[in-house]
């Protein structure tokens, strides 16, 4: 454990993916692999164009602000953040300037750790802005894709109130889940829809902040964890060596995954250098209280609410409930299972063990697999009515996924479980008659021979005997 006190602040950027058009233009808001196919004159900053605010984007921003317990302003406006980058055709970014009237000001959210303890993260602001284009760098040139230019972007800025990499990642995972549950964004890092700037400082005094170092555009949560831990160690070593003032300065660095270290990019630019001023082409407009209340009422069931329901209503363990709510698609799959009549504990067991194991191993999502809730019910029903055993069901489960056929395609009379009591009784009578010595020993007190008889029945039926019914019949006959 470090003898120094680390302080962490996060700036989480998430693209609003669930709108038809971009935030200030009518261009399609959609992830595309084909470059420069979702572009309008507004995105390219052609002369004479005028931006128009997408109301749906504002609605989603207000919804998120409400969830974060933030203050929503009476009036909303945008500002120009001036700096030159090749991925910003206008030469400025349309955004909101904290600590002025962003769409969400202040606030907090409570986050649960893996061990079940809860901590609070204080929010500085949430603001709505446009994303820049994306750059693809090659050996001797760089190419620009303007599909991303103008895509609505929510930037969530925390106070410097986090003190470990694990807490930082728990917060990010919680916020990503909320974006997904609310239908604000897919929040898919593989599509570049979510990224994070990380601010880290280290100090020997918990009441004093050290020099803030920013790491830009970390694209994965594992990267955030590694970057924070590396930077804490780097700054701590500088304190140990007495070189902190010389080696640690306010700067911007980047996380390099290949070398597993942060690399200096530039000295840190202050807000003053961006020369913010109010965007003249978008008039300040009033956010009606009645609209805010309407948006608050439309907030869907959030992850922690579903978790509470799964534990209290369906009797699931805290562990299973936590796994089910982590991804909205998994939680929706479970909800559908309940809706069509699958027992909640059976559904949870199959999802958390078999299905999650399969999709994690194969790097898939639950929406990618062939086994729908309806097909899972078909499989479970055949276990319940004794047609197949649990072991057989697991074998069929993999065949369904690999061959993309319904479970019933793999269930026949030849491989069906024997559950007929009369048929099993005849088989057991024959086995007991052929093992009279073992029967006498069992009745004399050798109780461990019971498993021997069960094994003989399984061997005789090539594993098809229903084990529950087999044990019931054996207990009756061995009295």
Image (cartoon, grey):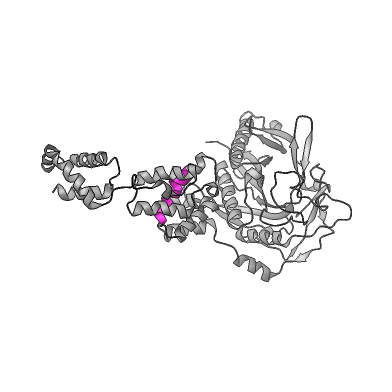
- Name the one closer to the observer, 328 or 75: 328
* Membership of 177 in magenta stretch: no
Q: Position of residue 164 (x, y in %)?
A: 56, 42
- Name the one closer to the observer, 239 or 133: 133
Q: Relative to 404, is 123 above or below? A: below
User: Among all residues in the image, which is located at the extreme right?
Assistant: 47
Residue 249 picture quarter: top right
- Name the one closer to the observer, 59 or 339: 339
Magenta: main secondary structure equals helix
Q: Position of residue 255 (x, y in %)?
A: 66, 36
With 468 as the anchor, is 262 left or right in this view? right
Residue appearing at x 70%, y 60% in the figure: 58
Residue 208 in sight in this render: no
Residue 142 picture quarter: top right
Q: Position of residue 71 (x, y in %)?
A: 66, 62
With 13 as the anchor, is 360 left or right in this view? left
Q: Relative to 244, is 370 above or below? A: below
Residue 200 in sight in this render: yes
* Membership of 354 in magenta stretch: yes
Q: Position of residue 372 (x, y in %)?
A: 49, 52
User: Among all residues in the image, which is located at the extreme bottom?
Assistant: 290
Count of labels shown?
A: 0
Residue 291 picture quarter: bottom right
Q: Which residue range is magenta in the image?
A: 343-357
With 277 as the anchor, is 469 left or right in this view? left
With 198 as the anchor, is 45 left or right in this view? right
């Amino acid at each position: 454990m470090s003898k120094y006190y680390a302080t962490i602040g996060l700036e989480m950027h998430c693209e609003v993916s669930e709108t038809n058009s971009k935030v200030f233009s009518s261009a399609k808001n959609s992830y595309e692999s084909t470059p420069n196919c979702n572009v309008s004159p507004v995105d390219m900053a052609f002369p004479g164009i005028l931006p128009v605010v997408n109301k749906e984007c504002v609605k989603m921003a207000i919804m998120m602000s409400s969830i974060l317990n933030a203050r929503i302003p009476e009036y909303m406006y945008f500002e120009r953040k001036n700096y030159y980058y090749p991925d910003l055709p206008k030469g400025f970014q349309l955004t909101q300037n904290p600590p002025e009237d962003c769409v969400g000001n202040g606030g907090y959210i409570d986050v649960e750790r893996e061990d079940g303890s809860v901590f609070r993260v204080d929010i500085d602001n949430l603001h709505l802005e446009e994303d820049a284009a994306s750059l693809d760098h090659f050996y001797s040139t760089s190419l620009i894709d303007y599909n991303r230019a103008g895509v609505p972007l929510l930037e969530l800025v925390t106070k410097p109130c986090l003190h470990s990499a694990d807490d930082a990642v728990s917060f990010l995972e919680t916020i990503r889940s909320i974006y997904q549950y609310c239908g604000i964004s897919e929040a898919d890092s593989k599509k570049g829809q979510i990224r994070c700037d990380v601010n880290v400082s280290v100090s020997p005094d918990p009441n004093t902040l050290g020099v803030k170092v920013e790491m830009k555009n970390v694209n994965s949560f594992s990267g955030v964890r590694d970057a924070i831990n590396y930077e804490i160690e780097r700054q701590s070593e500088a304190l140990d060596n007495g070189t902190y003032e010389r080696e640690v300065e306010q700067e911007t660095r980047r996380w390099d995954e290949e070398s597993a270290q942060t690399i200096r990019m530039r000295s840190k630019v202050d807000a003053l250098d961006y020369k913010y001023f109010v965007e003249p082409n978008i008039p300040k407009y009033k956010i009606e209280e009645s609209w805010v209340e309407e948006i608050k009422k439309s907030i869907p069931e959030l992850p922690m609410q579903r978790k509470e329901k799964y534990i209290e209503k369906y009797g699931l363990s805290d562990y299973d409930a936590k796994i089910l709510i982590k991804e909205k698609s998994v939680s929706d799959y479970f909800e559908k299972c309940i809706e069509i009549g699958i027992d909640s504990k059976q559904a949870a067991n199959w999802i958390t063990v078999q299905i999650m194991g399969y999709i994690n191993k194969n790097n898939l999502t639950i929406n990618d697999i062939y086994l729908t809730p309806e097909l899972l019910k078909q499989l479970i029903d055949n276990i319940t009515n004794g047609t197949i055993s649990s072991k057989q069901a697991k074998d069929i489960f993999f065949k369904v996924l690999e061959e993309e056929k319904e479970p019933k395609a793999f269930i026949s009379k030849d491989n069906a479980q024997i559950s007929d009591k009369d048929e099993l009784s005849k088989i057991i009578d024959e086995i007991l008659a052929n093992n009279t010595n073992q029967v006498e020993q069992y009745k004399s007190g050798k109780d461990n021979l019971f498993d021997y008889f069960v094994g003989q029945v399984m061997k005789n039926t090539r594993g098809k005997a229903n084990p529950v019914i087999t044990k019931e019949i054996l207990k009756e006959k061995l009295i």
